[in-house]
Image (cartoon, rainbow, N blue to C red):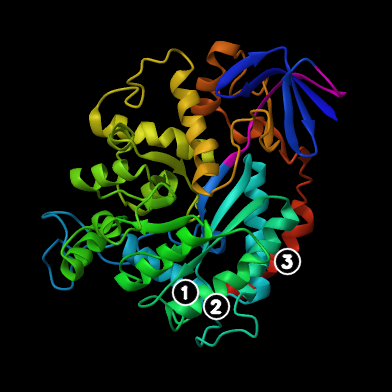
């Protein structure tokens, strides 16, 4: 039984000095005096592993290919312009970005999907991610034909995560309308059969894509089956104003209130994004004790808007973070942007610290959202390194220039707001150090990118 002995340990929401993290059979056995073979970690801190609760690993393939203007500026109300607030220039936005994403999604082979996903998961692990919720909607070939195994692409992604060593929950996405032929399955029964078959190989969650991609009956039936099976339920919710408008036109209400009406908004539901919520939406999510998965690095990249984490927490909602489009794989950047986005909106500092929690309090709160909040969203135990929880953790260099000089009382503020990825030395899952073989994965990744974009 190894006893990891860092200078500082963040366990159970507290920073501890001079104690050991004792691990047995991949689980935290105890925190305190060493009780096993010593693993000295002088000049190091040990913190819970981070979680990307919402990922589209294949979108790593389009990184850097959408950071330019592809459409002329259009004033709102001009011919061809989309309905947006008056005076806003809307030449490029989420919807035009989606065109580029679809172009990549249409061309990926199973082999290329595996190569891109594995490289993405390696990058996640290097950034301190130990568990990922993969929101996966590539199911068929480019002509819309099912593979011999309808879960071939899902299993390729799961295998990629397994080879890296990450925990994964495969959030198999239901798509009934819109999108590409590769996304759509013929019926809710077909989707649930395939999800059940997949659950025999990998932990799963149910994931109706959104209210625009699934009719109400699909969402109701999938939600009911998820509740019966004990699966988590994840959906895109109110990412874009247009999505809210479409929902009002079809259902006479907003996406969160529709979910509440269908019985699909519960404490096992994760509403991904939740950017464009009104007061009644926030109240409904809070009543349900549902989770909102914010993806700030993607939301700022796409111009989606700012998640009102302050109002959601006040209402009783829970939060986690996700890497989403993989434009930047840094869960601590997502955590700090929950706060920084609100500072720009409110013109105030420490918006998410109404408790006046002291020097390291807000940092610890945001770190918990990025660790324990993500595990809860995925239906997994752990995220705080308490005894009995999985021994998933990262080792941080306390002398890295980004946090050098840190002390116990300001550790979590420095880690959450200042730490660079260079400070993360090792990532452990189940007490085992991950050997991150970028050199071995790079040739197949490069070849996949060449085929995709040549």
> How far apart in space, not on screen, are marks 1 and 3 (Cα)?
20 Å
Q: Mark 3 or mark 2, which has the lower sequence index?
A: 2
* For residue 386, above or below residue 297: above
- Residue 46 screen position, x and y as percent: 68, 26
Image quadrant occupied by the N terminus? top right
Residue 217, x across and y down, in percent: 32, 72
Q: Position of residue 68 (x, y in %)?
A: 39, 59
**N-term mark: 1 or 3:** 1
Name the secondary structure under disc 2: helix
- Based on the picture, tell me whether residue 38 belongs to the magenta stretch: yes
Give 211 or 322, whichever is nearer the viewer.
211
**Residue 208 visible to the viewer:** no
Residue interval drawn in magenta? 34-50
Asked whether, in this view, residue 333 is left or right of residue 436, the answer is left
Q: Position of residue 325 (x, y in %)?
A: 48, 56
Quadrant where the image shows the C terminus = bottom right
**Label 1 environment density (alpha carbons within 10 Å; few <14, some 14–19, many ≥20):** some
Name the residue tied to disc 2: 107
Q: Kindly indicate the quadrant of the structure image that contains residue 263.
A: bottom left
**C-alpha gap between disc 2 and disc 1:** 7 Å
Placement of 232 over or under 248, stated as above or below:
above
Q: Which residue is mark 1?
A: 103
Q: Nearer the viewer, residue 274 or 67?
A: 274
Distance of label 3 from label 2 (alpha carbons)? 16 Å
């Amino acid at each position: 039984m190894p006893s990891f002995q860092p200078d500082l340990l963040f366990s159970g929401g507290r920073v501890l000095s001079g104690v050991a993290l004792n691990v047995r059979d991949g689980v935290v056995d105890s925190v305190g005096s060493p009780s096993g073979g010593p693993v000295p970690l002088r000049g190091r801190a040990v913190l819970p592993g981070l979680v990307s609760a919402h990922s589209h690993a294949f979108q790593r393939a389009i990184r850097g290919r959408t950071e330019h203007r592809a459409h002329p500026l259009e004033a709102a109300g001009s011919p061809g312009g989309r309905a947006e607030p008056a005076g806003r220039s809307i030449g490029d936005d989420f919807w035009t970005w989606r065109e580029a994403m679809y172009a990549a999604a249409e061309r990926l082979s199973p082999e290329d999907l595996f190569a891109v996903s594995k490289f993405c998961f390696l990058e996640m692990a290097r950034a301190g991610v130990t568990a990922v919720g993969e929101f996966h909607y590539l199911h068929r070939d480019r002509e819309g034909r099912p593979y011999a195994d309808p879960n071939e692409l899902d299993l390729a992604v799961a295998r990629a995560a397994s080879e890296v060593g990450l925990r994964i929950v495969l959030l198999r996405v239901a798509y009934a309308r819109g999108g590409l032929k590769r996304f759509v399955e013929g019926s809710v029964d077909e989707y649930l059969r395939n999800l059940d078959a997949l659950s025999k190989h990998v932990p799963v969650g149910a994931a109706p894509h959104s209210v625009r991609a699934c009719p109400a009956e699909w969402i109701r039936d999938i939600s009911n089956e998820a509740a019966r099976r004990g699966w988590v339920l994840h959906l895109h919710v109110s990412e874009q104003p247009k999505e809210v408008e479409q929902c009002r036109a079809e259902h006479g209400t907003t996406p969160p209130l529709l979910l509440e009406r269908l019985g699909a908004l519960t404490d096992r539901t994760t509403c991904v994004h939740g950017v464009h919520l009104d007061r009644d939406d926030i109240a409904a999510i809070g009543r349900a004790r549902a989770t909102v998965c914010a993806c700030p690095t993607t939301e700022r990249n796409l111009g989606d808007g700012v998640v009102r984490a302050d109002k959601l927490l006040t209402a009783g909602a829970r939060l986690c973070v996700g890497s989403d489009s993989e434009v930047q794989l840094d869960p601590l950047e997502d955590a700090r942007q929950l706060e920084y986005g609100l500072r720009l909106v409110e013109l105030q500092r420490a918006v998410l610290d109404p408790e006046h929690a002291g020097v390291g309090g807000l940092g610890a709160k945001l770190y918990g959202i990025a660790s324990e909040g993500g595990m809860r969203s995925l239906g997994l135990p752990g995220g705080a390194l308490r005894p009995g929880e999985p021994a998933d953790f990262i080792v941080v260099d306390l002398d890295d220039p980004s946090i050098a000089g840190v002390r116990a009382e300001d550790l979590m503020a420095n880690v959450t707001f200042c730490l660079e990825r260079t400070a993360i030395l090792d990532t452990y899952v189940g007490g085992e150090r991950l050997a991150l073989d970028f050199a071995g994965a790079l040739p197949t990744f490069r070849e996949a990118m060449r085929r995709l974009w040549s």
